[in-house]
Amino acid sequence: MALMARGRTGLDAAADEVRATGTSALPLEVDVADPRAVEEAASQIERELGPIDIWVNDAFTTVFSEFTDIEPEEFRRVTEVCYLGYVYGTQAALRRMLPRDHGTIVQVGSALAYRGIPLQSAYCGAKHAIQGWNEALRCELLHHRSKVCVTMVQLPAVNTPQFDWSLSRMPRQAQPVPPIYQPEVAARAIVYAAGHPHRREYWVGGSTAGTLIANAIAPGLLDRYLARTGYASQQTDEPKLPGSRHNLWEPLDDAAGKDFGAHGRFDETAKAHAVQAWASRHHGMLAVAGIATATGMVAGVAGQVRGRRRLTTR
């Protein structure tokens, strides 16, 4: 397994976890906003580990702020990492996968790929861009009958350290919009999608499904609801710490000299499981069960009707 990120400390800690499972790990310091660096990393991966079978794009940075308070260079940086980082990674993977006609690319998305929310305009814009670009790419691969697959996993709010190291101009500490899920929920969904890439998209968490359905049915109503609740739901009651640092331009793990791990500070309230994610992975089995249940109900009703008819005849 190859791992790419900017911070050496976090990379080394993640690589140690991979090795503890008996898998070889190749940690690479890469800023995915640099297409040349991504291409060089892909070449190194194939030299040292062999052909790339699965490529997962999951780069992240953001600015918690009203749009009018975001500086142009900040907005550009979020776009370059969260959107163009996916583009550059996918291009590097396809240069190697297409000639072999084999491989899977997983785009890690969000409910915000369909539904914008206040205070996250840069991030929402990037996720929307990924959604549209990935659909276009998928159509092209289908046109060429390529056996390279792309799929997208739309995540809910996840309990990661990002809410402590993102640039924020809000008066109180940032938090994910509840309900919050543990990172293991997201990881299981991504691993499953990588092994079952013929589904064009996976929704993880009831909040993701509810948001996307509500946005498709009544987007204007959702606009007003988020205008009323979106500010408070993304902040805790605690004031933002003075002198808080952020990782927009450089990683914080190296500066702090420690690995922040995968979990944020919301372990007490975060959900460890998502019934909807399980249902999404087993929709075929649930459909069969639903048909069987419906068939049984119909048979039962028909039997009751026949019984009543016999009694009436007597």
Image (cartoon, helix red, strand yellow):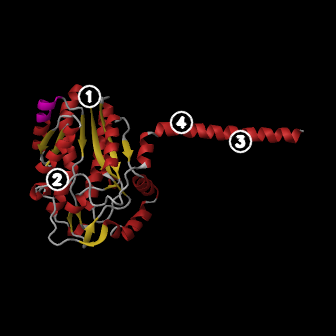
Q: Earlier in the sequence, mark 1 or mark 3?
A: 1
Q: Could you tell me how far apart the alpha carbons at marks 2 and 3 are, in whole angstroms?
A: 61 Å
For marks 2 and 1, the one nearer the N-term is 1
Element assignment for label 3: helix
Q: CB of mark 1 within 8 Å of CB of mark 4?
A: no
Q: Nearer the viewer, mark 2 or mark 1?
A: 2
Residue pointed to by mark 4? 288
Residue 132, position as x, y percentages in the image:
31, 47
Q: Is residue 5 visible?
A: yes
Which mark is drawn over residue 301?
3
238 up-or-down from 37: above or below: below
Cα separation, mark 1 vs mark 3, equals 51 Å
In-front residue for pair 110/76: 110
SS under mark 1: loop
User: At 12% across and 31% down in the image, what residue appears?
Assistant: 48
State the residue at coordinates (37%, 61%). 178
* Residue 259 - label: 2
Q: Quickly name the residue at label 1.
A: 102
In the depicted structure, whether residue 159 falls above or below residue 311: below
